[in-house]
Amino acid sequence: MTSAAVPAGPSRRVGGPRLLGRLPIVRRLVIAVAAAMSLVLAGAAALVFWRVETALDQQLDADLATYRHALVTDLRAGRSLSGPDGSAYQILDPRGRIVEASPLVRTERLLTPAEIRATADGATVHRDIGGLLPLDPHTLRLTAERVRLPRHRTVIAVAALRRGHRDEALRELLAQLAIAAGLTLLAACYVGYRTVRAALDPVERYRNRAAALADGAPRVRLPVPEDRDDEITRLGHTLNQMLDRLEASAERERRFVADASHELRTPLSLLRAELDVALHRPRTADELTETIRSVDAEVQRLIDLSNALLDLEELGGTKHLTRAPVDLAELVDTAVSVHLRAAERADRSLTVDVTPATVDVDTRWLRPALGNLISNALRHGQGAVHVAAAAHEGRLRLTVTDEGPGFPPEFLPRAFDRFTRAEASRTSQGSGLGLSFAAAVAAAHGGTAHADNTPTGPAVTLDLPC
């Protein structure tokens, strides 16, 4: 029984915060505004009340001091005792018996026995009778002191003033402060609610659009106003940018899957056909060797195609390139040297024209991009291949030309699309990814790629900042 009762206390203590945490944001913010405004209004009301009470008390004390002085003066002079309206007095002997008193306090002593003894010993008593609340018409403020009279007589003089006007003013002030604070709190809660609703309405619209996106609606974007620049608007722009990146990433994935399935189908079908033919009937050693060579060629094509697709996918997902200063001549020579033997075998010249410069690029991507352009020119073009590289005013231009018949006019607008081939002027096989890869590298550097037909032959140019 004891162990079961222990968790009950903490559960009740956290129940309030947990319940508050389950409320909608609007209600929580309104409750927070109400609580904060309540504290502010309570503090302001307390300060106003204290200032007014202090002022009234100072005035009442001044009036009481004047009356006490007049009472003592009349008492010592032996004159009849009197006072202003609302005043009262008692004259007590040292034992506390009433010697003389005004009609208002004739029957009841105003001092307690302890106060009588203290005053008889020379102390001065100053206190109130009755409180501000509940309502009491006989509230007094009094002061008492010992007075020595002629003939060695000693009495205790008690002077008192009614506090009715002072208490009535304070009660009226309390009522006015309560009304003003209540109305102010209601107004603050209403304004806070409307402000929070106005601030969170865009969030609700964002949520509705996000729900539509979750349901599969295409090209959904958040309704962000263009004429504002607050936190919610910046959040909307950030979320739209995120949606753009997510959509671009999803599109890259779809393209990768589509490209891979489209391009891998042919070599896989050829592999299956070669193996089926080899297994259909017994083959000689030469025939099997030829089949294995054909299979090896198709496997190598699959490897090259897979590597090209993976490079394109990795490049498309790269947020920042790793730029570093590099000598332009060294960059071009490294890219060209790989293809010199292929040019010699084809009995074609491969020349280079480089302007000395240092460029800030990512050689990991730019070198193979330039190599792809050279490989395309050697594989699909004719005659001499020329590579030109120059850096001027922060721009790097890499151009590869050959002496072939050029690109067909209908091919130029889509020259850098994936898996496109200019069949009219290209006779050998290829994946159609070389120009796409070069264009992706240029775009990642913040540049562009161009394909043109010149009087001497086709030319492909990469133009990027360096």
Image (cartoon, rainbow, N blue to C red):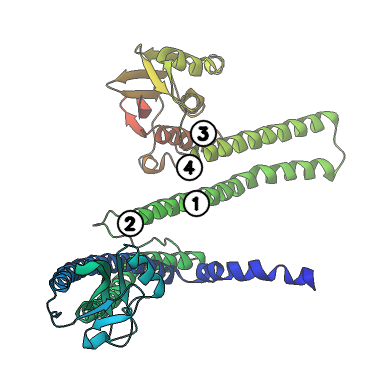
Q: Residues within 10 Å of mark 2 (few under 14, many from 20)?
A: some
Q: Nearer the viewer, residue 118 or 150?
A: 150
- Residue of label 4: 420
- Residue of label 1: 251
For this view, does 226 lie left or right of residue 236? Answer: left
N-term mark: 4 or 3: 4
Instruction: Give the answer, above or below, for where 437 lies relative to 143.
Output: above
N-term mark: 2 or 4: 2
Q: Residue furthest front?
A: 151
Q: CA distance from mark 2 to mark 4?
A: 42 Å
Q: Are marks 2 and 1 in contact (CB under 8 Å)?
A: no
Classify residue 307 by image quadrant: top right
Classify residue 300 by image quadrant: top right
Q: Is residue 183 visible?
A: no
| Residue type pointed to by label 4 | Thr
| Helix, strand or loop for disc 1 | helix
Dot label at residue 427: 3
| Residue type pointed to by label 1 | Glu
| Residue type pointed to by label 3 | Thr
Instruction: Give the answer, above or below, for where 95 lies relative to 370.
Output: below
- Residue of label 2: 233
- Residue 18 image position (x, y, % from top left): 56, 68
| Helix, strand or loop for disc 3 | loop
